[in-house]
Image (cartoon, helix red, strand yellow):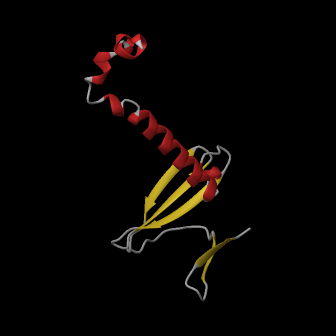
Amino acid sequence: MKFMRDYRLFADDHDCDDPMSGVVNLFDTAVVFISALLLALITVFDAKDIFSQESNLTIVKKNAQGEMVVIEKKGRKIQAVKMSREEAAGKGVRLGTAYRLEDGSMIYVPEE
């Protein structure tokens, strides 16, 4: 029964006094959780094209004030353009046609 009395001989007493010892790995756990969450979001939304250097991608975003921002990615170049309600004049080339469907969604058909 001597081993029962001397169980504290090998105990590391200085670690028990630290109140932060329970949260030592909290940062590492948070980094792993955030990485897993980002990977899951990319997989669910099939957004792998965002990170591909060869892909072309266009996103139209509308904020709470009704302003629209067009984010266009061509290869490695990303450009964001704020849309305004002002009319513009000048020469241009027709790029395609936009249609509003009965359910309210819009589709864009580029011209060949």
In the image, taking residue 49 as reference, residue 6 lies left or right, namely left
From the viewer's perspective, is 60 left or right of 52? Answer: left
Q: Which one is nearer the viewer's eye here, 51 or 23? A: 23
- Compared across the picture, whether 65 is left or right of 82 comes to left
Q: Give the vertical position of 37 relative to 22 (above or below).
A: below
Where's residue 103, x and y in %? 58, 86
Residue 99 vertical placement versus 3 (above, below): below
Q: Residue at x 40, y 17 (%)?
A: 4
Residue drawn at (46%, 55%) of the image: 80
Residue drawn at point x = 44 percent, y = 33 percent: 28
- Residue projecting furthest to the front: 1
Q: How many numbered dots are placed on residues in this image?
A: 0
Q: Quadrant of residue 3?
A: top left
Residue 21 figure quarter:
top left
Q: Position of residue 89 (x, y in %)?
A: 45, 71
Q: Quadrant of the C terminus?
A: bottom right
Name the quarter where the N terminus is drawn: top left
Whether residue 79 is visible here, answered yes or no, is: yes
Residue 32 coordinates in the image, percent (x, y): 50, 39
Which quadrant of the view contains residue 17? top left
Q: Residue furthest right?
A: 112
Residue 11 at least partly seen: no
Residue drawn 70% across and 70% down?
111
Residue 85 percent location from the top left of the image: 38, 74
Q: Nearer the viewer, residue 105 or 30?
A: 30
